[in-house]
Image (spheres, helix red, strand yellow):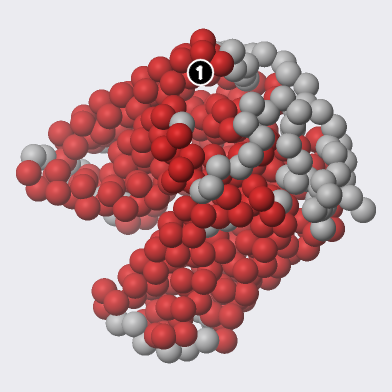
Amino acid sequence: MKIRNSSGLLGFLVVIAGLEALATTAMLPFVVVWAHDTAGLKGAAAGTLFMVQAVGEFGAGLVVGRLADRWGRRRVLVLSTFGMALGYGLLAITSGPAASILLFLAAGIFESAFHPSIGALVGDAVPADRLVSSFGFIRVAYNVGRIVGPMLGALAALVATSMVFALTGAMLLVATLLALAFLPADLGSHAEADDEEPEVPPGTLLALVRDRGLLTLVISGGLISVTFTWFESDGLLLLRHQIPLTQTAYAGLFTVAAAVIVLAQWPVSRITSKTPAGPTMLVGGVLQGIGLAALAFAATGYQVLVGAVVLMAIGEAIYGPVLSTVVARRAGSSRRASYMAALSISEDIGSAIGPTSGLALADRTHATLVWVIGGILSAVAGALNAFVSARSATSRSEPTPESPVQKEPLRTSPDAP
């Protein structure tokens, strides 16, 4: 049975997004242990699996947006989840470094298509006046997955470490079947009549070159991602210069952040769906900046760390869905996956630059100064987002989140499967 109403479509996209988050986070804490015990990758060599996965995801991400826009976002989503299910699932019966590295590379290539396709499909399925809250629901699903996934992985690891990959593959296979069974074949395979540029640009890189506003949004998103990665990847080491901190206490901060987003995202999105995009993203960037800067006072106690991550989480809940909404509207329906793939580069920038830059900065200054600089950069990123949104609204009369715009009904495309 194919779902046609927007609420039903959004519900299944939220479930699929949550299953992907559950699946990938279930295996994450056990990759290094499995690499040592089964894949024959000892010591630092275990990090090769993460590296090749990131290479595959980033490299394929430069072209996958165009593929999804031309071939159909629903098709590419199905291919992505099925490819990840095979890539990660086969690790349950794989041993040896070469096969493990190849499977992680393949899984990364397929994973590159997942988030741009989901983001574009939300834009396809949901009326424009509900985009902010809809992207908020997707973020809730991701964060629920990040909380529950490691717990499920730990249960599977009680049987055998390799079982976490079987669990990951099974959950991704369920996501594939849900997409096949309930998402209409023509979803993500149409262009709206009011598109200013109906043709699809040849690739994400050219989209960035043609649209300077999109490039600015990606750069500002990359700044926010880099500064948050200073906390996410380098935080334990940096904070230990300020306060005695165990690994368990540090991990607890991420649980707090995810729980805050789960609890706060819906009421926050109800508010931000009625406010102009630019000032909203500025407030979100500034709040995350205040949270990062507050880490400079970590020596005063653990409660300061909890307060800091709460501020960062609320900041993310404010600007994240609005940023996705601005990019989705800026793209138009025929280029939506290409633009969403460009936005995904922001996360890749954080993963590539964040860990080394944070440690290098701390070596030359002090941990407390790293947090202050991070706070300033996050606020600057929010200001850049606000500037682009204001120019878009002025030059193109682009609707703001508070402007209700109805979307045309889905139309069947000639090339729909």
Q: Judge left or right: residue 397 versus residue 243.
A: right
* Circle count: 1
Please tell me whether residue 228 is drawn above or below residue 94 in the rendered image.
above
Residue under numbered circle 1 = 392
List x then y, in percent, for residue 3: 87, 45
The residue most toward the top is: 394
List x then y, in percent, for residue 175: 71, 60
Q: Quadrant of residue 64?
A: bottom right
Residue at the (76%, 28%) spot, across then down: 193
Residue 33, visible in the rendered structure: yes
Residue 224, visible in the rendered structure: no
Please tell me whether residue 153 is drawn above or below residue 379 in the rendered image.
below
Residue at the (40%, 17%) spot, across then down: 387
List x then y, in percent, for residue 79: 67, 63
Question: Of helix, strand and loop, which one carries label 1?
Answer: helix
Q: Quadrant of the C terminus?
A: bottom right
Residue at the (39%, 85%) spot, across then down: 97
Q: Nearer the viewer, residue 71 or 305?
A: 71
Q: Nearer the viewer, residue 75 or 98?
A: 75
Residue at the (53%, 52%) spot, across then down: 146
List x then y, in percent, for residue 21: 58, 54
Q: Judge left or right: residue 354 versus residue 324.
A: left
Q: Nearer the viewer, residue 337 or 300?
A: 337
The residue most toward the left is: 364
Q: Judge left or right: residue 335 versus residue 413.
A: left
Q: Nearer the viewer, residue 396 or 273?
A: 396
Within 10 Å of disc 1 (Cα), the crowding (few <14, some 14-19, many 20+) is some
Name the kind of residue labelled 1 in the image: Ser
